[in-house]
Amino acid sequence: MTVPYEHLREDFKILQQHVNDEPLVYLDNAATTQKPEAVLKALETYYHTSNANVHRGVHTLAERATTQYEGAREKVRRFINAPSTAEVLFTRGTTTSLNWVARSLGDLIIEEGDEIVISFMEHHSNIIPWQQLAKRKGAKLKYIELTDDGKLDMDDAREKITEQTKIVSLVHVSNVLGVVNPIRELTDYVHDKGGVMVVDGAQAVPHMPVDVQALDADFYAFSGHKMMAPTGIGVLYGKRKWLEKMEPLEFGGEMIDFVELQDSTWKELPWKFEAGTPNIAGAIGLGAAIDYLENIGMREIMDHEQNLVAYLMPKLEEIEGLTLFGPKKASDRTGVIAFNIDGVHPHDVATAMDMEGVAVRAGHHCAQPLMNYLNQPATARASFYLYNTVADADKFVDALKATKEFFIHGLD
Ligand code: PMP
């Protein structure tokens, strides 16, 4: 390994603590990630040196804040290889990004009887906006089935996506199954049928190289807080040909050109969509997070997570009574591992593991249709990131075994 992963932890003060008298092993990265000193420092420096409102002022601080905010947009553009900053909108996060598309694109192109296609592995934020759109317009919402090993069923995808399909919205990496979906192949198919492709990239952009031009998706959404940036900042990438035709969803300051008594005109892209004072510090923090990730390298981060999964899988498969969800092959997935111990509720699993200092999540992971599909009321989930080490993986397995023993003896 070229990156000294043991030393990376030093960049994260929060990871250097004990929880329940045990060194913290943080494995809830799919929910949110920790922030390195470099990101915290960028926020502090911004507030110490440059805080002002953007775009409106000619004074020095206003110019500095604007330069840094727009500089962050350029960093995002480069990071995902978008053709222009006009196509990079700052939002509150993936949820807002997907809601914007469902509302604004939905209003533009969906008519009664049209079809919208998603899949059974979607997060609620890539289900409910489409349900609402379908209800509003009298459209039909269809779900692509999954294979037994937790991948998208591509045969079913080809059957469900038809000439009637106006929008397809799919997750790039599932927050439960960890599976990486073949977005480019799907996008080509959707475009062949005349549809628009939307991608929920919340669990992809933080963990692997993402090139929106190579994927050719029409829209791509993600959140800053899952990639070491602060909460409250996210991105919607959209192709200019769509964004230009779409109406903004919020109206007010910053997004206008001219305001008359009965009518107004909008600024050009991307500002037409960004009404009001934006999350300036959040965007700058996202820029700093991108610098941090790029310094390590996205391919390197993906390899690191896949190596951890490859290391863990055989150890987990040995544990009797443990059900694992998602593909078995490490190369098909990122560092998200959902699991259940027979006869033990996942909340009890997460509570017992917390006693060992291991932070995992339990619940439906905002994916109730997927839980029903898997026939599980809930699952436990460990999700790894670049600061997790082989020692963390070992501690996870040990804590899992101890948890299982504890509950089996408790039930005897
Ligand atoms: N989609 C996926 C796949 C996610 O994992 C999440 C976050 N759990 C979201 C969407 C929503 O992201 P946010 O809460 O940051 O808007």
Image (cartoon, grey):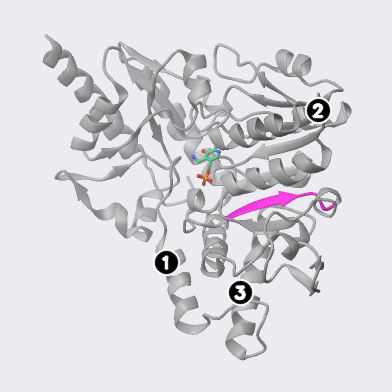
Q: Which amino acid, by three-letter code, is at mark 1?
A: Leu
The image quadrant where one finds the C terminus is top left
**Mark before the other along the chain sequence, 1 or 3:** 1
Disc 2 designates what residue? 112
> What residue is at 49 percent from the left and 48 percent from the top?
226
- In this view, the residue in front, 258 or 270, is 258
From the viewer's perspective, is residue 62 above or below residue 175?
Answer: below
Q: Secondary structure at mark 3?
A: helix
x and y, in percent, of residue 325 in the image = 46, 20
Answer whether residue 243 is magenta in the image.
no
Q: Amino acid at mark 3?
A: Gln
Residue that label 3 marks: 68
Badge 1 is on which residue?
40
Image vertical order of residue 106 relative to residue 231, above or below: above
Disc 1 and disc 3: Cα gap in Å? 15 Å
- Amino acid type for the residue under numbered disc 2: Glu
Give the structural element (helix, strand or loop) at label 1: helix
Residue 245 coordinates in the image, percent (x, y): 85, 51
Provide the residue span drawn in magenta: 234-240
Query: Whole-Å distance between the Cαs marked 3 and 2?
Result: 44 Å
